[in-house]
Amino acid sequence: MSRRLRIPDLGGAVAVILHRPHPTVAALARQLEAIGLRTLCHWPDLPPAVQSADYLFIDVDPAHEDQFPWLPGPAPMPTIALIGSEAPGRIEWLMNFGADAQILKPVGTAGVYSALLIARATFDARAEMSDQIDSLRRRLSQRQVVVRAVALLAARGKSEDAAYDQLRQMAMAWRISFEEAADRLVENAATDKEADNG
């Protein structure tokens, strides 16, 4: 299933620029403001309040993990890397940081708008993929519960295939996931067992 991408409305969005004072910053800020974004410039560190910003532009050349008010790894907002040096160490740092788009320095009169759109789409896709992976991990961890639920149903004289099919039908009837139905069945069986023993 493919995701349909839409161009976001950038008017009123906040872009944070982490870059030492430089003509690059002025050129970038002008372009962002022309697009309709509000800009905040910081150097050498970002204050915690920037975590609510809509976009982050970072100067990759001197960047390091201690500049950011979050744990190492991807930023909590779409990030655009400003690249001046293609030194392998800087590129490696950038790849590990997880920027969503890039602009080569010096910043010219083009490229900022497309970088914003690409960064937003990449950031959203990564967040969606992360959610899907988490969901799959939860479902995988529930596999043992499914096995127990099928065994409970099979203990009533059904084949394993028939028990599995019955569990699927129960999930559809209850309008819940297969794993949730298995969990409910196992919990009910445990409650019934406790009542019989009590």
Image (cartoon, rainbow, N blue to C red):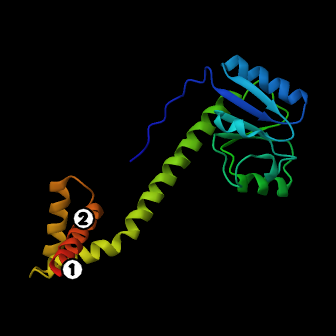
Locate residue 37: give its quadrant.
top right
Q: Label 2 belongs to which residue?
A: 184
What distance separates the C-alpha of mark 2 from that of mark 1? Answer: 14 Å
Callout 2: SS: helix
Residue placed at 49% from the left, 31% from the top? Answer: 6
Residue placed at 37% from the left, 64% from the top? Answer: 139
Q: Label 1 belongs to which residue?
A: 151
Q: Residue 9 carries which label?
A: none
Residue placed at 15% from the left, 74% from the top? Answer: 163
Left or right: residue 117 compared with residue 136: right
Tell me residue 66's x, y (percent): 81, 51
Quarter in which the C terminus is drawn: bottom left
Nearest to viewer (mark 2 / mark 1): 2
Amino acid type at image mark 1:
Ala
* In the depicted structure, whether residue 103 falls above or below residue 97: above
Locate residue 155: give its quadrant.
bottom left
